[in-house]
Amino acid sequence: MASIDIQSIRKSFGAFPVLHGVDLSIRDGEFIVLVGPSGCGKSTLLRMIAGLEDVTSGDIRIDGKRVNDLAPKDRDIAMVFQSYALYPHMSVADNMSYSLRLRRTAKEKIASAVGGAAAKLGLDPLLERRPKALSGGQRQRVAMGRAIVRQPKAFLFDEPLSNLDARLREQMRAEIKKLHGDLNATSIYVTHDQIEAMTLADRIVAMHGGVVQQVGSPLELYDRPANLFVAGFIGSPGMNFFEGRYLVSGDRAELQLAGGTALPARRAAGLESGAKATLGIRPEHVVVAENGALEASVDLIEPTGFGIIMHVRVHDIPLKIFTLDRALLNPGPTVRIDLPADKLHLFDAEGRRLD
């Protein structure tokens, strides 16, 4: 396996810039997830690493070697696509072994590589079938097996689970994570699904508008989002936000909303009293209590089985609450809530986190 270094990478399609100077170092054996909304540049970056897109400027190094001008076949990487890309006229075994046969690998080595990959992925009973006789999940396993037999320096996954239903995605996430543990392979995984990112990644690279917004472990992005984009994108349901004026009086700080309601806030160095700011709190951290400091009107209740998502309003500001208390399935027109001070996140007018 190998490390991958991305240095000041920029990409433009004609006059339209897509990536705006991406820097990222991926350690040998690390599982990195590129996550962000559609159009953020994550798939473009992956395709540039693979050699399927040209680099406008900057360098990509695999195991210390600059690969900008190398053809995809010479980069020693394997890619798993969203569309499976299997040959319909070939059996599972032939699909998995195709790249090795092109390299004129010895038959004994091909049989050993295909057998080992099939055993890891539970494909042994399916080796003689053709893709049309397989389910979506089985086809994705074959695509993964085709990548494994090559024993590449790195694996690249381009939204490989997006064509599967929810149950299969859950199953395949577990299989991919277990496979990574078995192979200890350097892997880069692209997804727009933040649940996939949180469950799979050693580190998450959150992208938006062609710019890396934050790099860190899943819990680092959840607990300490660097800006409003990361705070709103990571977590399900997404974080709640209150915009207002940051006011300081003595040792006390608060955020004053447009309606005059004041929410507690911590003192933040570099933020002057009267400045615009945003407070955030995750739905699971909002507390519903009889003696809560704020009154909220109830708009909608969504039971999820495990818990309940409550849609409420505080002075006409929408707020989501996630709770496990089933007594709140019929809460009445209003509830009282608290926003624990130690669970609040403070952001400046530009959306940057304030520690």
Image (cartoon, rainbow, N blue to C red):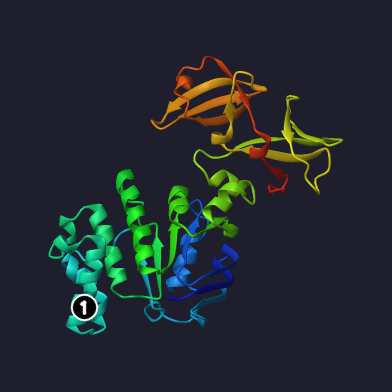
Residue 55 seen in the current view:
no
Q: Residue at x 24, y 75 (%)?
A: 113
Quarter in which the N terminus is drawn: bottom left
Residue 346 seen in the current view:
yes
Judge left or right: residue 78 versus residue 64. left
Residue 213 at x, y = what percent? 60, 56
- How many numbered circles are shown? 1
Under circle 1, the secondary element is: helix
Give above or below for 252 relative to 198.
above
The amino acid on which the numbered mark 1 sits, given as a three-letter code, is Ile
Q: Residue at x 70, y 44 (%)?
A: 347
User: Outermost residue, top direction?
Assistant: 332
Give above or below for 74 relative to 338.
below
- Residue highlighted by disc 1: 110
211 and 205: which is toward the camera: 205
Judge left or right: residue 137 versus residue 307. left
Judge left or right: residue 161 versus residue 42. left
Judge left or right: residue 100 versus residue 261. left
14 and 137: which is toward the camera: 137
Q: Residue at x 44, y 74 (%)?
A: 51
Residue 99 at x, y = what percent? 27, 76
Q: Pointer 1: residues within 10 angstroms few (<14), some, or many (20+)?
A: many
User: Outermost residue, right direction?
Assistant: 250
User: Outermost residue, left direction?
Assistant: 128
Residue 156 at x, y = what percent? 40, 66
Residue 50 at x, y = what percent? 43, 72
